[in-house]
Image: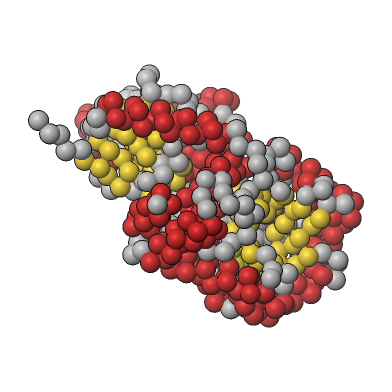
Amino acid sequence: MVTVATTLRGTPVVPGLAHAPALVARAGVDSDAVARFGTGDFADGDAALAAYDAAVDQVAGGFEAKAGVAHGAAAEVLTASAGLARDKGLRGAVAKAVRSDGDLLAAVHAAVDQFVSIFTGMGGLMAERATDLRDIERRLVARIVGVPEPGAPAPVAPSVLVAEDLAPADTAGLDPALVVALVTEKGGPTSHTAIIARQLAIPCVVGTAGVLDVGDGTPLLVDGVAGTVELDPDPERAEAAVAADRAAREAQASWTGTGATADGTSVKLLANVADGPSAASSADAPVEGVGLFRTELCFLNRTEEPGVDEQAAIYADVLRPFAGRYVVVRTLDAGSDKPITFATHEGEENPALGVRGLRLSFDNPGLLERQLDAVAAAAAETGTETWVMAPMVATVAEAASFAEAVRERGLKAGVMVEVPSSALLAERVLEVVDFLSIGTNDLTQYTMAADRMATDLAHLTDPWQPAVLHLVAMTARAGRAAGKPVGVCGEAAADPLLACVLVGLGIGSLSMAAAAVRAVGAQLGTVTDEACRAAADAALAASDPMAARDAVRVALAG
Ligand code: PEP
Ligand code: MG
């Protein structure tokens, strides 16, 4: 009998192959249990509120327990979720509703609705907290009616975790020995699921239509490079493919070279860093420097702008580990998805298209001046070669005045190419700056008119979109003609296959999370310049990202 394997396709975000049974996350609370519970039959509003408080303790306690064993961003997100579950304003809204009609589940729902609409109205990161609130609501309802909390079940054997999308509480504390891959129906390359999968280095495919129809326990072969999820694959073939992939990955993990193609064309590999600790740990990776220091990430929790001396000390901690190499410092990219209390404009209708990045200096030039003074002081103190670039530059005039301010301080000046206008005018922008760095995350968002945070638009917020690659090609061509460096520092640089395309388009440096460097370096070492150029032509000619990936694989194999 011939079995025809069914293969689903999505957007690949973390490379690697995994073969294991599906473990499907429960999306909601058992509806029979909710129906049986009804209005709960409480003696009075206070009794109902006591049941709410008990549920809050269980839900928040669960988050806190997970936070205790998680690290870094995951621990922070879980602690924030615990705080949100215990929020006094939310409790006040529940108390008011339950005292008026005694129906606790309806009261919880109404209170959460009220907070969700407030958060959504605030936009940016706050809007994302709406997803967390909905997750908290489902957990509270489950506790109140006395059934297990929904979300990712704890695996007991190696499994592929399948879900609509994953909440922070589902992904934090995941054990990569038991969850060998993640597949979601929604979510884009910058979604929470993708970020956690990248951190854990487990294969991940997002935006996979139809995956929720897969039955629990169905064997899956997940390919985090091709973006495929094969149902019921031939077990021997699948195991052999996983073993070969593991061997290739082990070889990659020991890569220590300087970035270059097989025929010796140099490609600078650089690290993306957020602060002193991440710079210190990235300095051990095989990188020639830092291609993107996201300075705003040092100030997410600050309500007041730090003084020049304090800023200089913070920047020096990033520059110091890279003495003898070089660091590209990006000035504050506050606003939109990264609100900073002391810089962001409040209440914008459409913050992604609003006053963010360099635009904040238009009516507050002192903010940029003080930051440049601090960067210059840190550069002088550490002796590290320091380049400075601005985010969200849209015109040649903006680039020129930024470059002047940077050069006045004796530093090398560049701008990011994130807005299509600056790619289209790259030749003229390069007349006024020393280098360009392409931010493919935002360049994709603005080229495709698709919010990079939208969970339903993964096929559009994909840097493999041929339109985005054409803008990258234009920018790289302008750099070659001007004899000035052009690099990529968005997530695209961390994708080994796309890295070959970028090199084929003429990009000279790739900056990425340090954890991604070895895989990219190893991959580049296996391909010739000619193969990269053929891959680039194939990607530019493709009709969509999936076709582009397929065509590039063929071009690189040939
Ligand atoms: C980008 O947009 O690609 C980029 C590197 O900047 P950020 O992701 O910080 O917006
Ligand atoms: Mg950006």
Q: Is residue 92 above or below residue 405?
A: above
* Residue sitting at the far front: 263
Residue in front for this viewpoint, 213 or 41: 213
Residue 174 percent across, percent down from the top left:
47, 29
**Residue at left offset 56%, top offset 25%:** 69
Q: Position of residue 360 (x, y in %)?
A: 67, 68
Q: Residue at x 85, y 55 (%)?
A: 379
- Is 33 situated above or below 90? above
The number of numbered discs placed on residues in the rendered structure image is 0
Q: Residue at x 58, y 78 (%)?
A: 425
Scheme of colours in the image: secondary structure
Q: Nearer the viewer, residue 241 or 418?
A: 241
* Location of residue 431 in the rendering, given as x and y in whole percent from the top left corner: 70, 78
Residue 403 seen anywhere in this rendered image of the structure: yes
Q: 170 or 531, which is in the foreground?
A: 531
Considering every residue shown, the one lying at the far right of the view is: 381
Position of 160 compared to 253: left or right?
Answer: left
- Going by the picture, which residue comes out furthest to the top? 156
Quadrant of the rendered structure where residue 503 is? bottom right
